[in-house]
Image: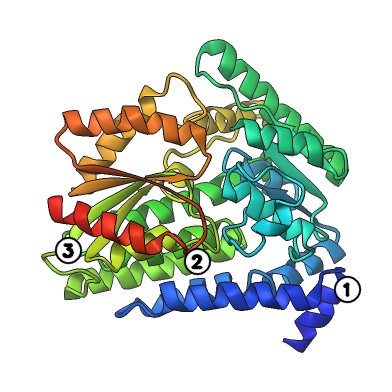
Amino acid sequence: MSDYREMWSRLSLDVELHQQLLDSMGRKFGEQVLRQQNRPQRLRYFDDVIRGAHTARVQELIDHRNAGGKVIGTFCIYVPDEIALALGVTPVALCGGTPFSIPYAERTLPRDICPLIKSTLGLAFSKTCPYAPVKDMAVGETTCDAKKKTWDFLGKVANFHVMEVPQKKQATDAALWQAEVVAFAQRLEQLTSRALEAEELSKAIRLVNRKRKALARLYSYRKSEQPPISGTDALVVMQAALNDDAARFCGKLEGLNEELEERLTRGISVADGRSRRVMIAGCPSVMGNWKMHHLIETSGAVVVCDETCTGTRYFEDLVAEQDGSVEQQLRAIAERYMKIDCACFSPNEERIENILRLAKEYRVHGVVQYVLQYCHGYNVEALNVARALKEEGIPGLKIETDYSEEDTGQLRTRIEAFLERT
């Protein structure tokens, strides 16, 4: 660890405060993830990705830059990884899921905005985010008002690019998004002083599709009557997907999938016949946040599906693989990312239909709508989701919370009562 402390010092982090952050996150990871029983052996790699997010992974990024590569930080799954990878750029997620850094953001930002934004910016403001000094550019997107205005603020002080996400899915919106994808590619060409090549873009599309296919296979095991992996551990894998080297991650996940196949054959499960099957729908649970999964799964249920950006929205739908021109491939990328059904879209019947489809595919006993405090998009849309679930006879529960542990007792009571009704 002493070597990493030296690295943190070179990055101008507050080394002592940063160590307090890691201690806080480490305790939570140990309590909410590592204490689970009967975990697959090959999950150890993904545990190490989480634990090494501020150490070994940062050193890899520094080495990548020293070798002439670039690093971009992202806040949303709308940013196309394929374009970055094709230009030798490594994308990493910057989103924070810890309450530790929120007070540092609230010295500048309003208190009544979503905890994900405050946690993320608080890490930078407190000099405890090692990615801030490593990245060459950050990429934001316009999926909510709080983010848009935060990007205005950050754009004054950092190398920042914003992608305009449309609010509808009509032809004019698709054209706008296509233009945004092209503009993003051009911005990365400027950053790298390289031209985007069709062959490299094709390779990157295949790599990211490989990741999506491996994640889809992981989720297929969660559909089984006796799931071989917990929802908490599936979340750990998803969080690692947003941080780890793409090719290495694919190989490790494919290995884990083989173990899950074997566990399924041998009847090794994390649940018993009495466990209620729950789907979490709504806001993402980014690295540092295992709260909702932990509460549900220590209340006698198993989370079998996540309809979130750290779940199905991240890997469903592939980019059409083709050996066409750069323009054709960028069009295919834009078409795939436009299928993501974020709550920023209105109307958003597509998301309602997907929730009902997933509930049936995963044979859930109930759906927990997870809404981060002050996330108005998912909070208001929860009304339509609740109505659709009721019409289909699927029990639902909406939980609005933040990253703190102060409400866990109350939430556990509500979750246990909900599970009794399902």
x then y, percent, for residue 272: 15, 69
Horizontal side of 76 relative to 197 (left or right) equals left
Tag 3 residue: 275
Q: Compare marks 3 and 2 and give the one earlier in the sequence.
A: 2
x then y, percent, for residue 286: 53, 56
Q: Distance of mark 3 from mark 2, alpha carbons?
A: 31 Å
Q: Secondary structure at mark 2?
A: helix
Horizontal side of 73 relative to 376 (left or right) equals right
Horizontal side of 235 relative to 130 (left or right) equals left
Given the image, on which type of amino acid does mark 1 rest? Arg
x then y, percent, for residue 112: 60, 42
Q: Compare marks 1 and 2 and give the one earlier in the sequence.
A: 1
Eye-nearest disc, 1 or 2: 1
Q: Residues within 10 Å of mark 1 (few under 14, many from 20)?
A: few
Q: Secondary structure at mark 3?
A: loop
Q: Distance of mark 1 from mark 3, alpha carbons?
A: 49 Å
Q: Quadrant of the N terminus?
A: bottom right
x then y, percent, for residue 148: 69, 32
Tell me where residue 221 sits by quadrant.
Answer: bottom left
In the picture, the disc for residue 251 is 2
In the picture, the disc for residue 348 is none
**In the image, what residue occupies the spot 70% across and 78% down?**
19
User: Which of 263 and 158 lies nearest the eye of the viewer?
Assistant: 158
Above-or-below relation of 346 to 340: above
Tell me where residue 48 sits by quadrant.
Answer: bottom right
**In the image, what residue occupies the spot 28% across and 33% down?**
386
Tag 1 residue: 10
